Amino acid sequence: MMAVNVAVTGMSCLLGSEKCSIFLCIDPVKYDLVLRSIEQETSNLFRVEKILAVAIKKALDDAGIRITKKNAHRCAILIDNAYGIEEFKVQSFISLLKKEASKTFLVPYSSANVLAAKMSILFNIQGPSLTFSSGSLPGMSACFAGIDLLRDKRSDIVIVVGVNFFCKDLDRAFKRSGFRQESCAVLILEDSQRVEKAGRPAHGKIMNIKRSFYHDPKKEALGRSRLGSSQEVKRHQGSILLSFSCSLFNRCPAIPRFSLDPKLRKRSVILENVFGNTFSSAGALGVIWGLCAFYHRMGEDPYWQSVSTEKKRREFLFIDQDAQGHYASMIIKESNPCSYSSRQEWLRCLLRSEGRPRIS
Amino acid sequence: MKISKREVVVTGLGVVSPMDCGSGLDSFWKGICQGRNAIKPLSLIPARSNYCRFAGEAKDFERFLERRYRKDSLRCSNLFRHALIQAVEDARCASLIHHAGISFGSILGEIDLGQKYIEACMQKRRNCVVSLQGYPLHAIPERLAQELDLSGPCLCVSTTCSSSGDAIGLALREIQCGRSEIMIAGGADCLSKILAAAFASSEAIAQDGIVRPFDKNRKGFCVSEGAGVVILEEANHAKKRKASIYCKIKGYGASSDAYHLFRPDKDGRGLSRAIQDALSEAKFKPSDIDYINAHGVATLYNDLAETRAIKRSFGRHAKTVRISSIKSMIGHTMGACSVIDLICCAKVLREGVIPATTHYQTPDPECDLDYTVSGPLVAKVQRVLSLSAGLGGQNCVLAAERLG
């Protein structure tokens, strides 16, 4: 694993709570006040853009960061968006089918990076603005790229976003993929030394990262054999948070095989058991979930209660793995103790989620 | 945090563009040096009033592929596959490739598959889940990573026209940070109905099929398809195995205009920041740069923004540096344009020939730099920049240097 030293100074997550079709969707109307607090005009934004703008604004407020002319070029936005904005694609294809006159906005709006471009305009983010698509692991891809930017001192503030939006025209396909609810998670990453020097608080520190790709045609190594033998799991005696995105979709044997391993079962939570398949928001959402667990007793869940009261080892290993063979992991540690009122909010948001936490 | 950086070199190149139609790098370079126009009337997609009339097609490139892939409908994957095979052969690294990672950039990927998938979903057909797996952008690098049994990271980035440039930048960081020794980096985009329709009525399209970057009478660009792959290696790793080295990649800069979704900042501030970032990482002074491969899409806003960005970053040296845009010949290869531009830069460094900006006739008083309009130029080139500016305001700059 590669040692890094990155602080998570702000975070926010929005999870679907409004019934729409057979899923739970995020209603941006609920966040009208937050939208109005954004300096630029937001009334003409599309629904998904509004949701993302709210999440970013909340995360920036949480970190106590204001993007000004002075720091705009030192700020980067990295978005994970595996499938693009399906609503726009559907519109584009319908107009094509109907042989309607073409509209020039089809291309930027059908491409995956339109959200990053729109958010960089809305928040005046002048540093790198990248969109990742890497199977179930895009959340981790953006985190890793953000860590590189901080490490190279190319950016001071990195906004890492994971989005997982729903399209009502494609509900059947989404259901089969394990999708249960919309989610949007944002992390604000900064150099840990810089944050400590400024005496600013942080939710947690990312200490180590690792990423690889395994060709796994039988999809067997994803289960106990891969995880059980991996160096990280062997060395790490603390809690383990796992994400198996796309596993339901691919009918991957990873989860049943993994859940049979009693040693790992005692120390781990599978994110998909909680939220369903969170696709591209899995990385950022997993980090938020783990960090909230440090500071608060997670309701009635005995597993997270024990984690949050554990005094000696306040760190967790987050592994994100998919059926295609992507593998990424990071160790996240408790940071300087501080009171973040926002954590209560995110915790409530996570606990309100349809799927209540279950022990695997 | 401690920064320890390793040198990264280019050891293999692979390209598929309308210029070579898959016949290889030599054919591509020959066409570029001859100033041949590869834009032709669109024939790949059945003509329709709402489609653009001219495009750059990589016709019959499938004939160079193995028989099992020829009938494959995944055109974007095939373009990338062919470029990748060429690059691996060129780098003579087939035995090492399973240690490599892959970094891929594209705008729309297998968008035709996406169309089929959405149509199937809307008609409640059962096969839509199968299509869902093949349609997102990351399906392309994943498919190839599985075919080649790669064990390194598999990255996929989308930043419109600078996608493959950013993919190269990310691969560069993987090697610099010591996470990989060898990376396959590049991008691809294919012609599709949605692409042909999206730009058809746009003012940014040259309806006559002639692309005139930096010319006062510019009419816009032509959409094209293509793919490019570069093999990036840690310098000592390449030297140890006595690989043939094209150039060193010395710097990468990325920025965002934060200005407008469809138009670049006409003052070129965003692009200028990316240029300065790339120059500072490479430790180059503006006077060190001998050639700039411009994005040069022949739209009023882009030409102006690019010219101003170069002036802003290069100061008094702006007028002496040679600039050209190969989009005047091959059109706009969308997500692949950055890597094809870098491939051109690598050839410029090796061959010492600067390609021309073709079709340039009427000077634009606002665009008054040296655009190499009078044919290809033989010159000793030591250091180059490759500029890309995407729709939405993403900018990417790569700095390369000749070895020795």
Image (cartoon, helix red, strand yellow):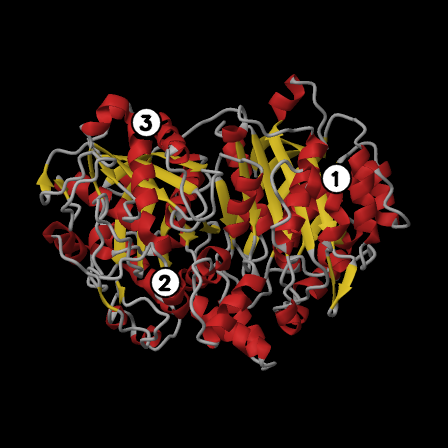
Q: Residue at x 37, y 75 (%)?
A: B72
Alpha carbon distance from label 2 to label 3: 35 Å
SS label for mark 1: helix
Q: Quadrant of the C terminus of chain A?
A: bottom right
Q: Which residue is denoted by mark 3 in the rendering?
A: B313
Residue A61: image location, x then y, percent: 70, 33
Question: Residue most toward the right?
Answer: A300
Judged left or right of residue B63, residue A282 is: right
Q: Which residue is mark 2?
A: B201
Kind of residue at badge 1: Leu
The reply to whether residue A269 is in sight is: yes
Q: Residue at x 50, y 57 (%)?
A: A109
Q: To which quarter of the image does residue B244 belong?
A: top left
Amino acid beneath label 3 = Ser
Task: Name the chain letter of the residue that bears numbered label 1.
Answer: A
**Category of crowding for the residue at label 3, using alpha-carbon neighbours closer than 10 angstroms: few (below 14), some (14–19), many (at least 20):** many
Considering depth in this image, is A119 or A197 the residue closer to the camera? A119
Q: Quick one: quadrant of the N terminus of chain A?
A: top right
Give the Cα separation between the discs numbered 2 and 1: 50 Å
User: In the rendering, which numbered label is found on residue A291?
Assistant: 1
Mark 1 and mark 3: Cα distance apart in space: 43 Å
Query: Which of the marked residues, 2 or 3, is nearer the chain's N terminus?
Result: 2
Q: Which chain does the numbered disc 2 sit on?
A: B
Tag in front: 1 or 3: 3
**Residue B385: x and y, percent?**
28, 36
